[in-house]
């Protein structure tokens, strides 16, 4: 069994065994020096592999994140980590609810590290705070009035 670690898993300092992997973008989130860097160096010393997921897996994750409405909440590093878990058929270790939601959409097994984790998968829609209009796709500002867009749970 392989575990794919996101930044929160690395920074937790917990031991997940030596069959662990992460992505180059996750490594970029941890700056040299200090406690976080030492945790990363420890993970690498016990055998953590750094693997770049294939482009096809990244495309699958992006499409799934668009379907669920989580795309606006995911960084490139988040997308890479989910894509690596998808590609390796590995268990994703993350406390990030948006990552868990997309993993659920793609039927990727995931586990929380410190937080409780999501209870159910959500689909999101987006609403302008100013004029109240709803949108199916994420936009930073409302194209009608220029107000700020927030996500809200999509009710069927």
Image (cartoon, rainbow, N blue to C red):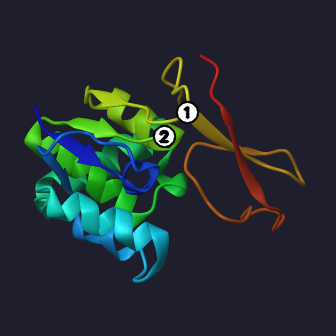
Q: Is residue 88 left or right of residue 153?
A: left
What is the x, y in percent for residue 126?
Answer: 67, 45
Say what secondary structure mark 1 lies in: loop
Q: Mark 2 touching mark 1, by CB under 8 A?
A: yes
Location of residue 53 by image quarter: bottom left
Which residue position holds label 1? 115
Is 88 placed above or below 79 here?
A: above
Say which of 96 and 17 sits in front. 17
The label shown at residue 65 is none
What is the x, y in percent for residue 5?
Answer: 29, 49
Q: CA distance from mark 2 to mark 1?
A: 6 Å
> Residue at 43% across / 80% down in the picture?
31
- Mark 2: few/some/many CA within 10 Å (<14, 14-19, 20+): many
Q: Is residue 45 left or right of residue 6?
A: left
Say what secondary structure mark 2 lies in: loop
The label shown at residue 95 is 2
What is the x, y in percent for residue 41?
Answer: 27, 69
Is 102 placed above or below 79 here?
A: above
Of pointers 2 and 1, the one earlier in the residue sequence: 2
Is 121 placed above or below 139 here?
A: above
What is the x, y in percent for residue 56?
Answer: 13, 55
> Quadrant location of the C terminus?
top right
Q: Is residue 69 left or right of residue 25?
A: right
Q: Residue furthest right?
A: 130
> Residue at 64% across / 20% down in the picture?
155
- Mark 1: few/some/many CA within 10 Å (<14, 14-19, 20+): few
């Amino acid at each position: 069994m392989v575990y794919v670690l996101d930044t929160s898993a690395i920074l937790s300092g917990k031991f997940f065994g030596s069959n662990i992997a992460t992505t180059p973008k996750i490594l970029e989130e941890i700056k040299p020096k200090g406690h976080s860097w030492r945790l990363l160096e420890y993970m690498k010393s016990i055998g953590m592999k750094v693997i770049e997921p294939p482009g096809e897996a990244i495309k699958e994750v992006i499409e799934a994140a668009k379907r669920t409405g989580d795309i606006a909440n995911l960084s490139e590093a988040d997308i890479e980590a989910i894509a690596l878990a998808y590609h390796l058929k590995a268990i994703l270790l993350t406390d990030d609810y948006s990552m868990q939601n997309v993993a659920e959409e793609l039927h990727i097994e995931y586990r929380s590290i410190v937080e409780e984790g999501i209870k159910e998968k959500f689909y999101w829609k987006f609403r302008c705070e100013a004029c109240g209009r709803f949108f199916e796709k994420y936009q930073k500002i409302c194209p009608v009035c220029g107000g700020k867009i927030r996500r809200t749970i999509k009710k069927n």
